[in-house]
């Protein structure tokens, strides 16, 4: 029973911790990613004017933001990293709630005459970004279009923009891209674009159904793809699901191995009760009835351990949610999130019941053989 108790509690705790981590990433993505994202199927950029006109005719659209993304090299003091710059317009903060992800500094892109950039926390840590340092600026570097590389003067083949670090965001993305946000006008100048965008990000009115996405697809045609939040982070969500159920399978396998203790305990019980089996056989009990005794005994042991383990696991989860026993550094929250889901509890209980039955089959058959032999 102790084996089933520990196994059940561990499974519930670990699955609940994984649920909490998944919800934390989803909340972060929901703040950084829009309700819908419009991208061109072929190519990297497109002219947004006609597209925006078509989008505005569709009901349920609250805000539209133009964004321009590209991979760049970012240099700050003595550090240098590859990042993905995201040029955003004035509507961006109305489409995405990036203020909820702010760890330091501000979400404004312009202070007095200075143009500011907002860094993802991982990129900021590697570059040792200091938002309070008003002297040092970050250099954003990309190859100049059509320019040939010159070993004598490499700067002639590069475009460079200087941006003052203004804020740090807690951004968690599935593709491990380090993001840098900056005004789209600056990024267009950096990339030698005029009015092009790489995507349009859309915020929907509350209560709008999924029909809006279908209406957008029909209005824009096959040249564009419309991505909802799940599709924008499909890899991350699939990875979380795979990791969760892989963990569940591994824990179930470990519990199956540990359940051999129950097989041994029930087998010893059968051997200790040989005289009782003889009495039952003499009283006329048939083999199937003897078998049911040990099947029920194994089921009782597994269910008793499972119920106690479930109570223990749920108690730990409650303590974690209430008092934050496990701390979480470098995040928007102070302690590791926990989410208990009824489906997980039911799945764990089913596994325990199956293991209890499996661990009882051999002792039950042994009891029948001993009872039949003794009876003769």
Image (tube, helix red, strand yellow):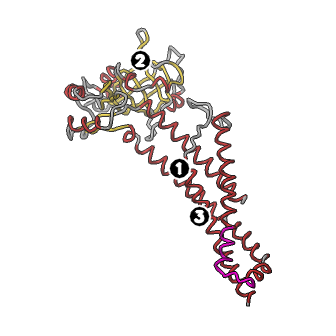
Residue 61 position (above or below residue 116): below
* Residue 334 spot, x, y in % from top left: 62, 31
Tell me the crowding category of disc 3: few under 14, some 14 to 19, or many 20 or more residues within 10 angstroms, Cα based: some
- Mark 2 or mark 3: whose residue is earlier in sequence: 2
Which type of secondary structure does the marked residue at label 1 adopt?
helix
| Residue topped by disc 1 | 343
Q: Secondary structure at mark 3?
A: helix
- SS at badge 2: loop
Reply yes or no: does residue 12 show up in magenta.
Answer: no
In this rendering, would 211 be left or right of 232? left
Q: Tell me if residue 291 is in the magenta stretch.
A: yes
Q: Residue at x 19, y 27 (%)?
A: 50
* Side (left or right) of 138 relative to 68: right
The magenta segment: 281-296
What residue is rendered at 37% in x and 25% in y? 95
Nearer-the-camera pick, 85 or 200: 200
Image spot of residue 176 (x, y percent) = 46, 39
Of the pair 370 and 284, the residue shown nearer to us: 284
| Alpha-carbon span between mark 2 and mark 3 | 59 Å
Whether the residues at callouts 2 and 3 have beta carbons within 8 Å, the answer is no
Q: What residue did someone put label 2 on?
A: 109
Q: How much space separates mark 2 and mark 1, taking CA atoms?
A: 44 Å
Pick the front one: 348 or 176 = 348
What residue did someone put label 3 on? 354
């Amino acid at each position: 029973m102790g084996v089933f108790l520990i196994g059940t509690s561990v499974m519930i705790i670990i699955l609940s911790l994984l649920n909490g981590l998944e919800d934390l990433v989803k909340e972060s993505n929901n703040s950084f990613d829009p309700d819908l994202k419009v991208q061109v199927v072929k190519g990297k950029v497109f002219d947004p004017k006609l597209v925006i006109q078509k989008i505005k005719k569709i009901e349920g659209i609250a805000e539209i933001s133009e964004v321009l993304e590209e991979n760049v090299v970012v240099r700050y003091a003595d550090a240098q990293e590859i990042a993905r710059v995201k040029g955003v317009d004035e509507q961006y903060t109305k489409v995405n709630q990036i203020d909820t992800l702010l760890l330091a500094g501000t979400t404004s892109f312009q202070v007095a005459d200075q143009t500011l950039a907002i860094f993802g926390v991982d990129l900021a840590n590697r570059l040792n970004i200091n938002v309070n340092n008003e002297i040092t600026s970050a250099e954003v570097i990309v190859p100049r279009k059509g320019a040939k590389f010159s070993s004598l003067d490499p700067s002639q083949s590069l475009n460079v923009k200087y941006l003052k670090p203004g804020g740090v965001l807690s951004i968690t993305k599935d593709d491990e891209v380090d993001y840098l946000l900056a005004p789209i006008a600056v990024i267009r100048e950096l990339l030698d674009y005029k009015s092009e965008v790489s995507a349009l990000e859309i915020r929907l009115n509350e209560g709008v159904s999924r029909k809006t996405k279908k209406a957008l697809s029909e209005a824009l045609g096959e040249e564009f793809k419309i991505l909802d939040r799940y599709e924008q982070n499909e890899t991350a969500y699939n990875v979380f699901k795979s990791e969760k159920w892989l963990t569940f399978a591994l824990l179930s396998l470990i519990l199956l191995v540990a359940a051999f203790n129950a097989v041994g305990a029930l087998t010893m019980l059968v051997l200790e009760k040989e005289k009782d089996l003889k009495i039952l056989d003499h009283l006329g009990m048939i083999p199937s009835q003897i078998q049911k005794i040990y099947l029920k005994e194994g089921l009782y042991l597994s269910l008793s351990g499972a119920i106690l383990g479930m109570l223990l696991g749920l108690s730990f989860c409650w303590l974690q949610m209430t008092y934050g026993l496990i701390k979480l550094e470098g995040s928007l929250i102070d302690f590791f999130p926990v989410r208990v889901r009824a489906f997980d509890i039911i799945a764990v209980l089913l596994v325990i019941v199956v293991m209890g039955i499996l661990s009882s089959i051999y002792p039950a058959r042994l009891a029948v053989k001993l009872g039949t032999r003794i009876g003769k």
